[in-house]
Amino acid sequence: MELRSYQWEVIGPALEGKNIIIWLPTGTGKTRAALYVAMRHLEMKSNAKVAMIVNKVHLVHQHYSKEFQPHLKDRFKITPISGDSGSKGFFANFVKDSDIIICTAQILHNALMSDSQEKHVELTDFTLLIIDECHHTQKDAVYNKLMEIYLQKKFNGHRKLPQILGLTASPGTGGANTFEKAVEHILKICANHDTWRIMSPQTSIKDMEAKAKQPIKQYDLVPERVKDPFGDKLKELMTTIHQYLGDFEFITEFGTQMYEQKIVQMEKDGAETSNRRKRTCAVHLRKYNDALFLHDTVRMKDAYDFLDEFYTSEKLEKNSRNEIDIYLYTLFDGYRHNLLALSSDIKYENPKLKRLEEILKKHFHNSSNSHGIIFTRTRQSTNYLLQWINNTDFLRGLNIKAATLTGAGFSNQSQHMTQNEQKEVIQKFRKGFLNLLISTSVAEEGLDIPECNIVVRYGLMTNEISMVQVRFLLKTIIPYI
């Protein structure tokens, strides 16, 4: 197994048995470096057992098929275990019979907590834990719950604890706005991993930079609508609901993430205090806020259709209606005709879409080789952007073959994709049956997606982790809209 000079440099302390975090850019071979550490660990330590822990189901099979199985299958017993593999019910037996286990953090945590003889394992059953994307080891994440068990055992005097090897393309700054807070965030991650040191290349940086991909970044600041009567009507509706509640605390924050958080809390408070009016109004206000997000991201028509579908399904599903339901239904019905008329007025249409259309024209016009990804915030917006591409006359004439790619987790907003559906979409993209993916952040971290020559972060303010992750997908340019 060949390693590059920078990989040798960062794994040195791990080969000596020290707990470290390997910090290498996406696409430079973190997993290959960890694979070598695992191999040497199994060769040198008696009764060794390795667990490769990931935070997403698809990474179990990706790491197994791309790295561990091709390089180590002839020497070691390797078992991938995920929620859909049928193996998790006999986790303890597979751990006992395997040299290397690759599984999600949740499955390992469930096994540690289980009373079942077939499922239960101890952390001390392993001699090396490799934690992929270890920057997630914070707050309430399952990675952190695993490391809390580890640290508790350490503080209680256990000596036969596994070696910890963390992998990250960027530890991030935790949203810090000062140097001191950024340092504090990174130190917390180190403490959570009981880490001796974060290892990044010092003497072989040029070798690493030659391997890493550095995209050209282009920022497109699109002016907001000069007039926005559709958005104003939505805010007027929301203000009316707040007046109905007698609540005027944050009516100036409509259409923001902060407002959404407050409305989620309002719904929770209403449920806990059995305040039906507060809880019901919070549900409707959140839908209006989602519509404002869509209005800012896609077409006015899409925001209207979203609300229309919500109220249509509400009326169909609720057999008995109380006075609060009737008030909210009547309120929307009173605005319905006006909203529908405004949503079809092209002079108020979203200017971001015009800029996105220009970018797609540039890269897909007269080009059969373009492959791209559009990142957007929500599953809803991926679906509406796909509809927009399919319904826009000029874009229909280009050689754009698009599909959505979203996460496998459940959401109250829209239907999730299964892991098999994700694989099918990526396979079609790889083979050229598709040349444009419209994706949520699921594609930024870990999915085995081929290189692209255009990646658009549409309506997203990037963070340092997603920017590092997305570099691996790029050949040329990232426009930010």
Image (cartoon, rainbow, N blue to C red):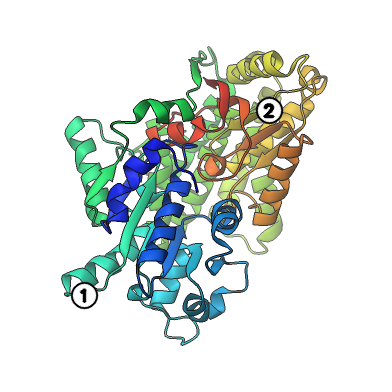
Task: Give the labeled residue for mark 1.
Answer: 158
In front of the other: 306 or 444: 444
Q: Residue 193's spot in the image, x, y percent?
A: 28, 56
In front of the other: 308 or 443: 443
Q: Residue 201's spot in the image, x, y percent?
A: 32, 35
Q: Which residue sits at x=52%, y=67%? A: 76
Mark 2: which amino acid? Answer: His
Mark 1: which amino acid? Answer: His
Q: Which residue sits at x=75%, y=41%? A: 428
Classify mark 2: residues with Cα within 10 Å, few (<14), some (14-19) or many (20+): many
Q: Which residue sits at x=57%, y=41%? A: 443
Classify mark 1: residues with Cα within 10 Å, few (<14), some (14-19) or many (20+): few
Task: Give the labeled residue for mark 2.
Answer: 371
Q: Residue 373's spot in the image, x, y percent?
A: 62, 31
Q: Left or right: where does residue 324 sit relative to residue 137?
A: right
Label 1 element class: loop
Point out the frontmost of discs 2 and 1: 1
| Quarter assignment of residue 10 | top left
